[in-house]
Image (cartoon, rainbow, N blue to C red):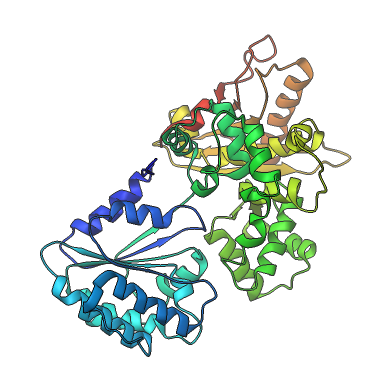
C-alpha cells in the first residue's frame, strides 16, 4: 500500500508558502530521528525536487564527497561531472553548473537531508552551503530545504549561528511526533482498526513516532503488539534505545545519563538533583546537554506553580525511553506473553498513571478546547508540596492558570472503566483543594476537573465536587 501524508497541516502550509512565494527560500526542518521529516518534504515537494542528497552517518569527508558525485550523476546523468569534487566548494559549484539550465518559471527544490552528517568536522560543508546560497541560489527561483535529526546541532550551527548562513533562513519547521488525533488517522491509513483505549495504550509505550507506529499489526490487541514490538528479540523497539541517542548527539553517554536519572523520578528533577543522580559535573556541558534534549523533544522543563527559576524541574517526556528503561533494559524476561504478565503488576499501574498524565500534558490545546477556553491565555504547571509533621503533603497533576481569574485543578487518572469516587477519595480531593489555596494564597476561582479514560460514574460523593468530567475522547480532537 502506498504511504500517504497524514496530518502535518501547519507544516505543509509552511512548505507550500515557500514554494509559491516570489522569493528564493531557505527552509530548515528540524525534528528527532524517525519522526517523518524526510517523508514530509518528499511528499509535499514530489513534483518539484530537482536534487536531493542525504548525509551518511559516520562517513569521512572523502566518502561524503563521493556520495555527492554519485547523486549528481544519478540525478543529472551525463551532464554531471565525472570526477569527484575535491572539496565542498567544488561540489556546490558542480551543482550550480547542473542546475543552471533547469532554472525557469517553476520553482525548483534542493533538499539536503541529515545535514549534521554531511557537515563533518573540518569539512567546510557549511562554508560551501553558504557559498551556494549567497552567490547563486539566493538570486534564483529556488527553495533550499535543509534537514537534520540532531535538533540541537541544527539550532546551534544553522539557526543561531553567526556565520555565512546567519539570517538566511526564511522559514523554520520543528516537526513533532504525532498527537493522538494524527496517530489515529495514521493507523486508519494503514487499515488498522483500534478503539481509542487501545490507541492510548500503544501511545503510552511508543509515543507518536510514525516509524514506530508503522510496526503495529492489525488483528492483534495493543498488548499483543507491545509484546511483539518491544519484547520480542527481533522487535524494532527491543534495542532501539541503544541506537537512538548516539545517532543524535556527541557524547551521548551524558544524554543517556540524564535520561536515566529522570526516569527514576517521574515528577521531575531540578538541575541539582540531576547532577546528584547522574554523577555528571555541573557547568556548561550539562547546560548544553539539557538544552539539546529539550530541543530534540526528549525532555521538557517547567516551573511548578509559584516557584522561581532556580526551582525549574526537568521531566522525561519521551514515551519510548521511559518505557524501555522501566520494562526492557536489563530485564531477563523469559518466554512469551511478558507484557501480559507485567500489565498485572503494581509497577505497571504506577507507570501507566504517569504515562497517561504525560500524555495529557502533551494535549493541552485539546483540553482547553474541551473546557471552552481556547481563546483564553493560560499557563500550565503542576504542584507538589512535601508533607511535614504539621501539614500533609499535596500533589496536583495539572493546573491550568487562566487570565480570566480562574484555575482549573485537574486529577488525571488512567482507569480501566468508569471511575467511582468514594467518601475517602472525595475528602482527599477537598483537602487537596484547601491545602493548595492556603499554601499559594491564591484568590482565583478554583474548578476541580477530572480527566480519565472512560469518565466518572456520578454518585453522592462526586455531585457538587467535580466541576467538569472529561474523558480520553477529548484528547483525540484536532487542535
Residue at 75% over, 45% down: 327
Quadrant where the C terminus is found in the figure? top left
Q: How many marks?
A: 0
Task: Determine which quarter of the picture holds residue 222.
Answer: top right
Q: What's the residue at 46%, 69% (across, down)?
A: 154
Q: Nearer the viewer, residue 170 or 344?
A: 344
Point out the residue furthest to the left here: 105
Q: From this viewpoint, is residue 152 visible? A: yes
Judged from this view, the residue extending furthest toward the top is: 460
In the picture, measured across the screen, residue 171 lies left or right of residue 118, that is: left
| Observer-nearest of 34 and 282 | 34
Give 148 or 386, whichever is nearer the viewer: 148
Camera-side residue of 469 and 251 = 251
Q: In this view, does 234 lie above or below 167?
A: above
Across and down, in percent, residue 132 comes to 28, 80
**Looking at the rendering, which quadrant does residue 231 occupy?**
top right
- Residue 175 image point, x, y percent: 43, 54
> What x and y, as percent, mark residue 104?
11, 67
* Residue 165 seen in this snapshot: no
Quarter of the N terminus within the rendering? top left
Taking the view exactly as shown, the residue that stands out farthest to the right is: 389
What residue is at 44 percent from the left and 41 percent from the top? Answer: 377
Find residue 171 and report its horizontal and vertical position in percent.
32, 62
Amino acid at each position: 500500500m502506498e504511504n500517504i501524508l497524514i496530518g502535518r497541516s501547519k507544516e505543509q502550509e509552511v512548505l507550500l508558502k515557500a514554494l509559491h512565494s516570489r522569493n528564493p527560500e531557505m527552509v530548515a526542518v528540524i525534528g528527532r530521528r524517525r519522526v517523518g521529516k524526510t517523508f514530509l518534504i518528499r511528499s509535499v515537494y514530489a513534483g518539484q525536487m530537482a536534487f536531493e542528497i542525504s548525509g551518511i552517518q559516520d562517513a569521512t569527508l572523502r566518502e561524503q564527497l563521493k556520495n555527492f558525485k554519485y547523486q549528481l550523476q544519478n540525478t543529472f546523468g551525463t551532464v554531471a561531472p565525472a570526477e569527484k569534487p575535491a572539496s565542498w566548494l567544488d561540489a556546490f559549484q558542480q551543482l550550480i553548473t547542473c542546475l543552471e539550465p533547469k532554472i525557469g518559471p517553476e520553482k525548483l527544490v534542493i533538499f539536503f537531508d541529515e545535514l549534521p552528517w554531511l557537515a563533518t568536522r573540518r569539512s567546510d560543508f557549511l562554508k560551501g552551503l553558504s557559498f551556494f546560497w549567497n552567490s547563486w541560489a539566493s538570486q534564483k527561483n529556488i527553495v533550499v530545504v535543509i534537514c537534520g535529526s540532531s535538533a540541537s546541532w541544527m539550532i546551534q550551527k544553522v539557526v543561531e549561528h553567526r556565520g555565512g548562513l546567519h539570517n538566511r533562513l526564511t522559514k523554520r519547521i520543528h516537526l513533532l511526533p504525532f498527537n493522538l488525533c494524527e496517530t489515529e488517522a495514521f493507523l486508519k491509513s494503514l487499515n488498522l482498526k483500534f478503539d481509542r483505549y487501545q490507541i492510548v495504550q500503544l501511545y503510552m509505550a511508543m509515543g507518536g513516532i510514525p516509524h514506530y507506529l508503522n510496526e503495529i499489526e492489525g488483528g492483534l490487541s495493543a498488548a499483543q503488539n507491545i509484546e511483539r514490538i518491544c519484547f520480542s528479540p527481533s522487535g524494532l523497539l527491543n534495542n532501539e534505545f541503544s541506537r537512538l541517542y548516539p545517532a543524535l548527539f556527541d557524547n551521548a553517554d551524558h544524554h543517556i545519563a540524564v535520561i536515566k536519572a529522570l526516569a527514576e523520578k517521574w515528577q521531575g528533577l531540578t538541575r541539582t538533583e540531576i547532577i546528584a543522580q547522574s554523577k555528571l559535573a555541573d557547568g556548561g556541558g550539562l547546560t548544553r546537554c539539557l538544552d539539546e534534549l529539550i530541543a530534540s523533544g526528549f525532555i521538557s522543563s517547567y516551573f511548578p506553580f509559584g516557584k522561581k527559576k532556580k526551582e525549574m524541574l526537568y521531566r522525561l517526556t519521551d514515551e519510548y525511553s521511559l518505557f524501555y528503561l522501566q520494562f526492557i533494559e536489563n530485564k531477563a524476561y523469559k518466554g512469551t506473553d511478558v507484557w501480559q504478565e507485567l500489565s498485572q503488576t503494581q509497577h505497571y499501574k504506577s507507570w501507566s498513571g504517569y504515562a497517561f498524565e504525560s500524555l495529557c500534558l502533551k494535549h493541552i490545546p485539546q483540553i482547553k478546547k474541551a473546557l471552552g477556553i481556547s481563546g483564553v491565555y493560560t499557563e500550565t504547571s503542576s504542584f507538589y508540596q512535601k508533607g511535614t509533621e504539621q501539614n500533609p503533603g499535596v500533589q496536583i497533576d495539572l493546573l491550568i492558570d487562566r487570565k480570566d481569574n480562574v484555575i482549573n485543578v485537574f486529577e488525571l487518572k488512567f482507569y480501566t472503566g468508569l471511575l467511582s469516587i468514594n467518601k475517602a477519595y472525595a475528602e482527599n480531593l477537598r483537602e487537596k483543594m484547601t491545602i493548595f489555596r492556603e499554601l499559594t494564597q491564591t484568590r482565583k476561582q478554583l474548578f476541580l476537573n477530572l480527566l480519565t479514560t472512560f469518565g466518572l460514574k456520578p454518585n453522592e460523593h462526586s455531585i457538587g465536587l467535580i466541576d467538569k468530567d472529561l474523558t480520553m475522547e477529548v484528547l483525540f480532537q484536532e487542535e
